[in-house]
Amino acid sequence: MTSAPPRPARRPSGDAAARTPEPDPTRLRAVLAAVHRGGAQRLAERLRVHARFAVVTLDLRDAVFPPGGLRLELDTLAASLRILLPATAPAPRLAGRRRLTRVRMVTDPAR
């Protein structure tokens, strides 16, 4: 017995696409996924990361940090979090729950 190939996910179109909200720059959610967030951006004072069985990379090398620094509020389970920082940035403050999670901060890695 053969099964049919999986169908590709449908993308919203028309009015549904217009109603799709923009991603929240203060939250990152990853469940059974690999997520990369980076680029030139102005960071909020706080970023909430919710990750379950996920690999998350935060590339903050081109980001503008807030005056008081960045606070990462973590709620993770069986996750890997890699934070890429410029040489001049202070290390983010970590708070929250980290269960079976590896957090690595790398300063100014080669691109």
Image (tube, rainbow, N blue to C red):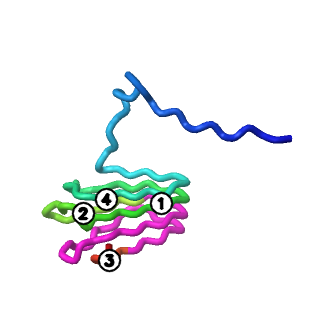
In the rendered structure, find residue 70 and report the number of the disc placed on it: 2
The amino acid sitting under disc 3 is Pro
Mark 2–mark 4 contact, CB under 8 Å? no
Q: Does the magenta stretch include residue 57?
A: no
> Which residue range is magenta in the image?
75-104
- Choose the circle earlier in sequence order: 3 or 1: 1
Horizontal arrangement in the rendering, residue 11 relative to residue 87 (left or right): right
Q: Who's the residue at 13% across and 63% down the image?
A: 67
Separation of residues labelled 3 and 1 (CA atoms): 24 Å
Q: How crowded is mark 2: few (under 14 residues within 10 Å), some or many (20 or more)?
A: some
Work out whether mark 2 precedes mark 4 in sequence or the reverse, and give the earlier one: 4
Query: What element does badge 4 sit on?
Result: strand
Would residue 42 appear left or right of 52 to someone viewing this image? left
Residue at the (44%, 54%) spot, across then down:
50
Question: Magenta stretch containing residue 91, yes or no?
Answer: yes
Q: Kindly report the distance in space between the C-alpha atoms of the residues bearing marks 1 and 2.
A: 18 Å
Counting from the top left corner in percent of width and height, residue 87 is at 22, 77
- Cα–Cα span, label 4 and label 1: 20 Å
- Of the two numbered discs 1 and 2 on the same chain, state the one appearing first in sequence: 2
User: In the structure shown, which secondary structural element does the residue marked by tag 1 occupy?
Assistant: strand
| Residue carrying label 1 | 76
- Judge whether 50 appears above or below 110 on screen: above
At x 29%, y 49%, the residue is: 25
Q: Which amino acid does label 2 sit on?
A: Leu
